């Protein structure tokens, strides 16, 4: 067997492997960069929402406290319920019934603000969920693409191995024929002497 010739069969596959590995590296780097940029953008947006929510919550608590002090009595109980709803919202609990807190005075405006804050919390959670889904989908797509590349490479290597094996079998059969021909020729020559 001529190993130099057999080795030359592998050169195109080595080039293909090198290109495939480079493509995989580029895909992985691109996915990492994209994920990092998206994560940074989501983190910045989340921090802004938290800061806005915190500032607004603090402002709402101050307003609620002043109203309770000024009005007292029935308004005091309303303020307590609003404060509980605000605290629940600040902890991310959006299940509270804000409609039960509705009023026609200044406290009603605060409750309306809490409704808006609750909507922002829900939207932020939905946004985060979408980001997580996109990240998971991108990872799944990356894994699928990598699996396809690996499978294609495996199939091409398998094909080359089969071709090399077929060539080796053919060479073996040819060498067997040549050995038999040489033996027959030697036998005839020995008889003719």
Image (cartoon, helix red, strand yellow):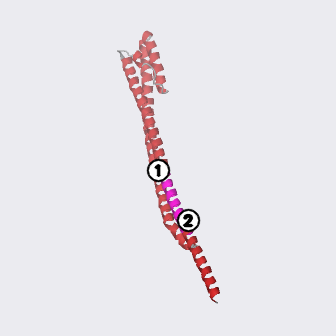
* Quadrant the N terminus occupies: bottom right
* Quadrant the C terminus occupies: bottom right
Tell me the CA gap for discs 2 and 1: 30 Å
Q: Is residue 162 above or below residue 146?
A: below
Farthest residue toward the top?
A: 73
Magenta residues, dominant SS class? helix
User: Residue 186's image quarter?
Assistant: bottom right
SS class, disc 2 = helix
Q: Nearer the viewer, residue 86 or 188?
A: 188
Q: Nearer the viewer, residue 42 or 68?
A: 42
Residue at left offset 45%, top offset 39%: 133
Residue 80 rendering spot, x and y as whole percentages: 47, 16
Residue 128 rendering spot, x and y as whole percentages: 45, 36
Q: Crowding near pointer 1: few (<14 within 10 Å), some, many (20+)?
A: some
Q: Is residue 149 magenta?
A: yes
Q: Is residue 116 magenta?
A: no
Q: Which residues are magenta?
A: 147-168
Which mark is in front, 2 or 1? Answer: 2
Q: Which residue is mark 2?
A: 165
Residue 104 rendering spot, x and y as whole percentages: 35, 15
Q: Crowding near pointer 2: few (<14 within 10 Å), some, many (20+)?
A: few
SS class, disc 1 = helix
Q: Which mark is residue 166?
A: none
Q: Which residue is mark 1?
A: 145
User: Residue 123's image quarter?
Assistant: top left
Residue at left offset 45%, top offset 35%: 129
Assess whether mark 1 and mark 2 are in contact (beta carbons under 8 angstroms): no
The answer to which of marks 2 and 1 sits earlier in the sequence is: 1
Residue at left offset 44%, top offset 44%: 38
Farthest residue toward the bottom?
A: 193
User: Residue 57's image quarter?
Assistant: top left
């Amino acid at each position: 067997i001529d190993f130099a010739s057999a080795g030359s069969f592998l050169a195109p596959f080595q080039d293909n492997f090198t290109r495939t590995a480079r493509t995989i590296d580029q895909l992985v780097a691109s996915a990492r960069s994209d994920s990092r940029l998206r994560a940074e953008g989501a983190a910045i947006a989340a921090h802004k929402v938290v800061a806005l929510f915190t500032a607004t919550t603090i402002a709402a608590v101050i307003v609620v406290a002043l109203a309770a002090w000024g009005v007292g009595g029935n308004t005091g109980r309303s303020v307590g319920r609003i404060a509980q709803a605000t605290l629940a919202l600040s902890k991310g609990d959006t299940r509270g019934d804000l409609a039960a807190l509705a009023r026609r005075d200044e406290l009603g405006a605060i409750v309306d603000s809490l409704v808006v804050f609750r909507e922002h919390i829900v939207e932020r959670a939905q946004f985060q969920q979408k980001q997580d889904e996109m990240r998971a989908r991108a990872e799944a797509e990356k894994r699928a693409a990598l699996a396809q590349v690996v499978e294609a490479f495996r199939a091409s290597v398998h094909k080359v191995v089969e071709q090399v094996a077929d060539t080796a079998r053919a060479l073996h059969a040819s060498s067997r024929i040549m050995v038999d021909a040489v033996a027959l020729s030697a036998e005839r020559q020995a008889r003719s002497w």
